[in-house]
Image: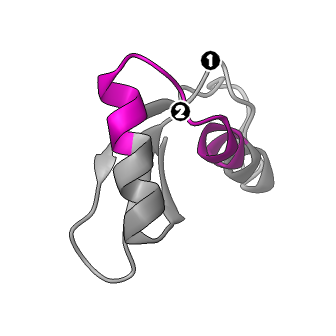
Amino acid sequence: MRIQLDSDRYTARRVRELHRAGKTHHESRDAAREEVWRRGRTPAAEPVFVGVTNGEPVRLLYDVEVHPETTP
C-alpha cells in the first residue's frame, strides 16, 4: 500500500538524507504505519521510504506491505 504523508521541505530533505545514510526517520515511519491502521489494514512489515513528491505540499512516500486478509 502506498502511503503519502504531508511534510515540509526541511523534513523531507532530512528524511531523504537519513534514508541515503541507511538510517530511519522514526516519526514519519511510525506515521505511515498509523495511516495503514487508520485505513483498516494490518501492516505485515515495516514501512519502506520510497521518495518525496515535488509538488506542494511536499509529501513523503512510503510503501507498506499489508496482510491480504485485512480488507477495509
Task: Give the magenta range.
Answer: 16-33
* C-beta proximity under 8 Å, tags 2 and 1: yes
In the image, farthest residue toward the left: 54
Q: Look at the picture and state if 4 lies above or below 14.
A: below
Q: Residue at x 61, y 28 (%)?
A: 66
Q: Residue at x 34, y 53 (%)?
A: 13
Task: Please name the amino acid that badge 1 sits on.
Answer: Ala
- SS class, disc 2: loop
Q: Residue furthest bottom?
A: 56
Q: Earlier in the sequence, mark 2 or mark 1?
A: 1
Percent x, y of residue 52: 30, 54
Q: Amino acid at mark 2?
A: Val
Compared to 53, does 25 lie above or below?
Answer: above
Q: Residue at x 39, y 16 (%)?
A: 22
Residue beneath label 1, please? 45
x and y percentages locating residue 55 in the rendered image: 25, 77
Q: Which residue is mark 2?
A: 64
Q: Horizontally, is 51 left or right of 18 in the view?
A: left
